[in-house]
């Protein structure tokens, strides 16, 4: 047994594995009576490495000839878990699949291909996927030709790949976040070889610019960078998404212009840490503030970005955002904790005072800015006082909304090795108290909007009531009002009549509709 096999055997029994074929970097093993083709597999050790290799940008992607019609007459079903980055990756996968002739279906029972694009951020995210895999087993039994694939962030974890092999042997394909463009070829292998195909690159690859993307609706996501180099001690993303790589400004600007021409009303620029944009350019002094300034000049009504890290939020960026226009006055600025000691243990690289100072600077430049955040409670060793510091910071800033989480240990991250003695009950209690405080401020923030006349982008019908339209303010607050369906996708002006904790009820102002329509 070679060393590579030995590592893997921690998670899967390789004792009776035999190599049955080897070709072009693909090795097929005979394991427990079936063939498993392993092109490459994830290892934590490599996933942590930050190599100096230059990232190449490719503009010549094409679906390989034999796969161009491989999906004709076939249906696919794709489920996405996790963040916007994953949602956008799913748009790329849909683009690839439909370029191969596949058609989407809502009904899993009639699908020829089912893909789960997974998230690894917290244990409960992973549990949902394992639960889903359990449910899918019977579909595979009923229809053996069905191909079942697992991709996304969970695939980047070596333990997950091992667990799938062991417990869910009916899965046909496992691939990761760095090799989405390989989907057509991997499907070919899975289709024709009738074996499990695993291809997960531990290290990030190059940037492929011209992948097809299937976008729908009035809002579009645009990646500006990939990966994360921050290594917050609780977080798995730097391991599942690789090192920071920025797309070239000209490619981003061309994409935004193209989306504007196609009529998209709102663009969200995506990166795990958008403020680090451009830091990796060796030949160019061009950062996130410069990019926003150039996008500000493009004729697209609304531009947002996700997510900004407080540490690299520089003055130039604040200056550019203060120009407003198509740059929205909403900033999602995850704080994680209000205690400087906890922030230090999280390796966030800013303290409470620095965060509050940043908030003051942003508010001075953009007085009507709306701030939202992410907060983790129950980080290993968090004391009652430290948690109170988080509550007091929440009160001091007055966030309009927040995503809050109980800390979830992630294998391989530094925090997973820290002593954690906080009882589960205490963690839950902290979460409830935090959410109560946040709700109070959501309500206050919303009350402030009573009787204001504001511009909103109509996104669709309300989920609860099809007679009601659902829209967003510039500050990303949810607005509900009665109006005709023709307004979907349009910017209209409404009068806020009844602010509530979660949404603003409003009335349409007719004249403004005519002006915008
Ligand atoms: N790149 C973004 C966040 C990505 S993950 C940023 O740095 O802000 C989204 C949120 O999930 C994080 O902000 C954090 O609050 C939460 N999170 C990440 N890892 C977690 C963990 N191990 N347990 C609980 N929450 C976590
Ligand atoms: Fe995770 Fe921190 Fe990177 Fe955000 S900045 S993705 S929390 S490591
Ligand atoms: Fe989840 Fe991966 Fe996003 S872990 S939050 S899908 S980057």
Image (spheres, rainbow, N blue to C red):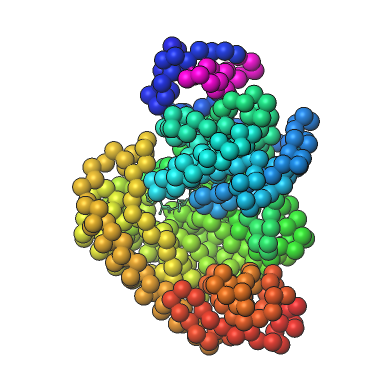
Residue 296, image quadrant: bottom right
| Magenta highlight range | 22-37
Q: Position of 118 compared to 357: left or right?
A: right
Q: Nearer the viewer, residue 33 or 441?
A: 33
- Magenta stretch, main secondary structure, is strand
Residue 491, image quadrant: bottom right
Q: Position of residue 503 (x, y in %)?
A: 50, 75
Please tell me which residue is depicted at 46% across the width and 54% down the height of the picture. Answer: 309
Q: Nearer the viewer, residue 251 or 384?
A: 384
**Residue 177 in view (yes/no):** no
Q: Nearer the viewer, residue 276 or 75?
A: 75
In the rendered image, residue 23 lying in the magenta stretch gets the answer: yes
The C terminus, quarter of image:
bottom right
Please tell me which residue is depicted at 58% across the width and 38% down the height of the picture. Answer: 142
Residue extending farthest front: 142
The N terminus, quarter of image:
top left
Q: Position of 325 compared to 410: left or right?
A: right
**Vertical side of 170 occupied by 336: above or below:** below
**Vertical side of 490 occupied by 5: above or below:** above
Q: Position of residue 317 (x, y in %)?
A: 55, 60
Please tell me which residue is depicted at 56% across the width and 83% down the height of the picture. Answer: 506
**Vertical side of 275 occupied by 197: above or below:** above
In the rendered image, residue 461 lying in the magenta stretch gets the answer: no
Please tell me which residue is depicted at 61% across the width and 66% down the height of the picture. Answer: 327
Q: Position of residue 245 (x, y in %)?
A: 57, 41
Q: Position of 4 compared to 246: left or right?
A: left
């Amino acid at each position: 047994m070679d060393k590579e096999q030995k590592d893997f055997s921690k998670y899967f029994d390789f004792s009776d594995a035999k190599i049955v074929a080897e070709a072009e970097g693909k090795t097929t093993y005979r394991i427990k009576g079936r063939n498993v083709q392993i092109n490459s597999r994830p290892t934590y050790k490599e996933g942590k490495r930050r190599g100096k290799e230059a990232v190449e940008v490719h503009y010549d992607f094409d679906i390989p000839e034999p796969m161009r019609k491989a999906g004709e007459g076939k249906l696919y079903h794709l489920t996405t878990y996790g963040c916007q980055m994953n949602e956008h990756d799913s748009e790329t996968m849909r683009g690839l699949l439909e370029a191969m002739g596949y058609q989407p279906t809502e009904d899993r029972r009639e699908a020829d291909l089912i893909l789960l694009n997974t998230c690894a951020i917290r244990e409960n995210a992973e549990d949902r996927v394992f639960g889903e895999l359990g449910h899918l087993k019977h579909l595979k039994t009923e229809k053996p030709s069905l191909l079942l694939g697992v991709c996304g962030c969970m695939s980047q974890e070596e333990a997950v790949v091992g667990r799938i092999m062991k417990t869910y042997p009916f899965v046909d394909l496992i691939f990761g976040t760095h090799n989405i463009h390989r989907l057509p070829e991997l499907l070919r292998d899975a289709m024709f070889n009738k074996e499990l195909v695993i291809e997960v690159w531990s290290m990030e690859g190059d940037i492929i610019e011209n992948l097809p993307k299937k976008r729908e609706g009035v809002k579009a996501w645009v990646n500006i960078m990939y990966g994360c180099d921050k290594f917050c001690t609780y977080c798995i993303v730097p391991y599942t998404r690789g090192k920071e790589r920025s797309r070239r400004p000209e490619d981003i600007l061309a994409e935004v212009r193209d989306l504007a021409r196609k009529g998209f009303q709102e663009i969200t620029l995506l990166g795990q840490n958008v403020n680090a944009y451009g830091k990796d350019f060796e030949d160019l002094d061009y950062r996130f503030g410069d990019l926003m300034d150039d996008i500000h000049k493009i004729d697209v009504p609304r531009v947002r970005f996700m997510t900004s890290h407080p540490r690299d939020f520089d003055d130039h960026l604040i200056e550019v955002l203060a120009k407003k226009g198509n740059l929205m006055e909403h900033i999602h600025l995850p704080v994680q904790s209000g205690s400087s000691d906890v922030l230090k243990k999280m390796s966030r690289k800013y303290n409470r005072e620095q965060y509050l100072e940043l908030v003051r600077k942003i508010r001075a430049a953009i007085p009507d800015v709306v701030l939202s955040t992410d907060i983790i409670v129950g980080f290993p060793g968090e004391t009652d006082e430290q948690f109170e510091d988080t509550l007091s910071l929440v009160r001091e800033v007055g966030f309009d909304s927040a995503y809050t989480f109980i800390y979830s240990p992630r294998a391989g991250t530094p925090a997973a090795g820290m002593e954690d003695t906080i009882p589960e009950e205490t963690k839950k209690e902290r979460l409830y108290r935090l959410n109560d405080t946040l709700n109070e401020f959501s309500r206050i923030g919303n009350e402030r909007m009573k009787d204001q006349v504001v511009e909103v982008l109509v996104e669709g019908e309300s989920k609860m009531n099809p007679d009601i339209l659902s829209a967003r303010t510039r500050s990303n607050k949810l607005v509900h009002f009665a109006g005709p369906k023709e307004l979907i996708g349009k910017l209209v002006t409404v009068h806020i009549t009844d602010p509530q904790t979660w949404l603003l009820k409003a009335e349409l102002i007719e004249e403004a509709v005519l002006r915008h329509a």
